[in-house]
Every structure is written in C-alpha cells, then in structure tokens.
Amino acid sequence: MQQIYLDNQATTPLDPKVFSAMEPWFTEKFGNASSRNHTYGWEAEEAVEIARESVAATIGALPKEIIFTSGATEANNIALQGAAKSYQDQGRHIITVKTEHKAVMDVCQHLSKDGFDITYLPVDKGGILDLNKFEDAIRDDTILASVMHVNNEIGVIQPIKELGAICKNKGIIFHVDAAQSMGKLSINVDDMGIDLLSISAHKLYGPKGVGALYVRRKNPRVQLQPIMFGGGHERGIRSGTLPVPNIVGLGKACDIAADVMIEENLRISQLRDTLLKGIRAENPNASINGSMEHRVAGNLNMSFPGANNEAIIAAVPDIAISSGSACTTSTMEPSHVLLALGMSKNEVYSSLRFGIGRFNTEEDIKIAVKSINHCMKKLGKMSFV
C-alpha cells in the first residue's frame, strides 16, 4: 500500500539537504560550541553563528537578536513568561486570540494564575482578527499582545503588519508565533513591527528539537527574564548546551526556504486547489473551514456533513491526514479553533485537515482524492456524530 503524507502542518519530513548538512556534526565534528579552548569548540561555535545568520536573514533581523531554543513551544514560553515578568511593573494585562496554539493559550492560563489579566479576542467566521477590536482591547496597563501569524489548523493568515503598527503606536510588546509561517510567507520583523517571534525547525523541513526566538534589541530593546537557569547560554536568556547538529539543520532549512519559497508556494497552491476541486466534485456539501482568501498555500481544512472525521481517517489508512492539531488530538476534545469560528460540535467532529508540502506530487493528490471519495461513498449517509 502506497502511503501518502498530507499532514505537513503537524510536522514536515527532513529535507535530505538538511540532513547532509547536519550529519558531520553528529560524528567527527562533535565539539561543544561553548568550549573556546580548542578547535572542536571553535568549529562548533562557528557553525552555530553561521546558522544564526541564516535564521536572522530569513526574517530581516540581526544575528545577535536570535536565541536558539528547543522549539516554538519553548520560544513561546520564554517570550510570554519572560516579557510578563520583565514588564509587570508597567502593567499586568495581556492580549491574545481565541484561536492561538495551545503553546500560547496554556502559557496565558498559567500567567492568569499569577495575577495577569488575559483578554482572549474573538475572530470572525473566516478566522480573522478584527483590527478595531484589537485596538479597542488595549488598555493603559496592557504590556503585551500575542498573535500567531498562520493558524496551525485552518492555515489562516492574520494581518500581522497592521497589528504590529497598532502595538508600536500604543507602546506595547508584540509577540508573533511564526511556527507555521516561517519559510512559507515573507517575514520582515522591522517592517511588520514584531518585537518577539517564535520559530520551529520541524515545520520547515528541518529537525525536531530545535527552534528559535527573535528578540528585538533596539527601537525598543525588549527585555526578557529567563525562565530556565544554568550556564547563561544564549545571552543569558536560554541556558543549556547548544545542539549543534540541530542548529545547523535549522540554518540550512532557512537557507533552502529562502531560495524556493515563491516557486514552492505556487506549486503547492495548485496542488491544494486540485485536491479541493477533486473532493468537491463528488462531495459538493463539503465546506471549507476558515478564509480561503487569507490562507497559507499548503493548508485545507474541510467539514464533511453527516460523517465523523475519525471514521474517515480510519477508512483511509494509506493517507496521512488529521482531525486537528497534533498537539491536542490525544484529548479527543473538539478543536477550540473551529469552535471559535462559530461551528457546532457536529461540524467540528466532521472536519479534516489536509497539509500539502514540499515533497508532495500531483500523483499524491490524485491518489488522495480517489481514496477520500471512495471512503465517502462507502460511508454513505451513515452518521457517527
């Protein structure tokens, strides 16, 4: 049975070019980047700094503004908790959005227990945040706003540049979770008014276990208190021995993304449109969740009325698709993202996410369409919800 991977919002396969760049750092080049007394350490430190330059260049930042982390979840935690602790004397109000990733939502819940007041803004039925509602939510004691660039479930793109301008005008710190947009959309932190930006390597064909946090150093200089203590690595913000192979992989993944992003987005958009057209040809009642106008190229989230998403997934074992975020599917609770769009629980439980990526082909999409359509015919009018 040929397996087709269409879950690229959960994770992406490691690009072979990335693996090749990483491989020597697992074996003969095994030095600690903090060991500055010999060649092994010097080589490792140089490799880390080259990767730092690559990450910075991808988002229009300075290399010294990049802090390496274990992934976007840790980057989000450092950004939100670190900023909250640093600026709590100026205020204890934080703004975020009801469709944020759990790595932001749960941190905000934790901060609320520490006395911070969190405002969770709604989105419209397309998943877009209203700029006027955002500006109206800002108070005199607001210190931080956190909005994800691209949603991990519905692929919707938020108006980050406009939000950044509002934050800058109001003098509040602006954090953006860019795990799903890095390498897929053009990002310039200065132009977009971003003060803190979280990055994940494994969402852009890099290795798991590494990410980065951009921390603005001027206009304004953002202060973060560390949330983990140790040797004072990464400018005292994130202690711990740096995983040189993974960091090299992140840097290489950024270099590749910068080279192929425009061409890749066009090809992937065409594949997604082919998938949508093929499914709707035999399932005209299937509906799209979230705005199609403001959506990243590789995402398609659809509801199939009268069917259950887990039943569909079980009926197509050759196609790797999901019913929602990989970080919450084990709970079997309805997606908070889809509920925030105003969907009923029945609609949520009939929804599937298709994630198309760099290594998918036209043949993959043809096979997927055939498999999904065959499954829907087989399930017929059976209701599982």
Image: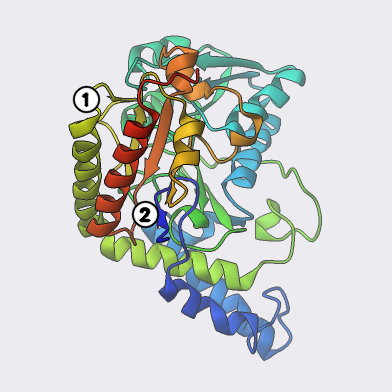
From the top left corner, tell me how far across and down residue 153 is, in percent.
Answer: 44, 34
**Can residue 150 be seen in this snapshot?**
no
What is the number of the mark on residue 276?
Answer: none
Question: Furthest residue to the right?
Answer: 230
Q: Nearer the viewer, mark 1 or mark 2?
A: 1
What is the number of the mark on residue 183?
Answer: 2
Q: Is residue 129 left or right of residue 241?
A: left
From the top left corner, tell me how far across and down residue 272 is, in percent.
Answer: 25, 44
Q: In the image, what residue occupies the spot 29% across and 35% down? A: 295
Q: Quadrant of residue 194?
A: top left
From the top left corner, tell me how far across and down residue 45 is, in percent.
Answer: 61, 76
Q: Quadrant of residue 33?
A: bottom right
> 30 and 114: which one is in front?
30
Marks 1/2 in contact by CB < 8 Å: the verdict is no
Q: Is residue 322 left or right of residue 277?
A: right
Residue 125 vs 15, above or below: the answer is above
- Badge 2 density bin: few <14, some 14–19, many ≥20, Cα 10 Å: many
Q: Is residue 109 left or right of residue 314?
A: right
Q: Which residue is mark 1?
A: 284
> 316 and 51: which one is in front?
316
- Badge 1 density bin: few <14, some 14–19, many ≥20, Cα 10 Å: few
From the top left corner, tell me how far across and down residue 103 is, in percent.
Answer: 61, 36
Whichever of callouts 1 and 2 sits on the residue coming sooner in the sequence is 2
Q: Secondary structure at mark 2?
A: loop
Q: Amino acid at mark 1?
A: Pro
Q: Is residue 158 left or right of residue 75?
A: left
Q: In the image, what residue occupies the spot 65% across and 68% down? A: 243
Q: Secondary structure at mark 1?
A: loop
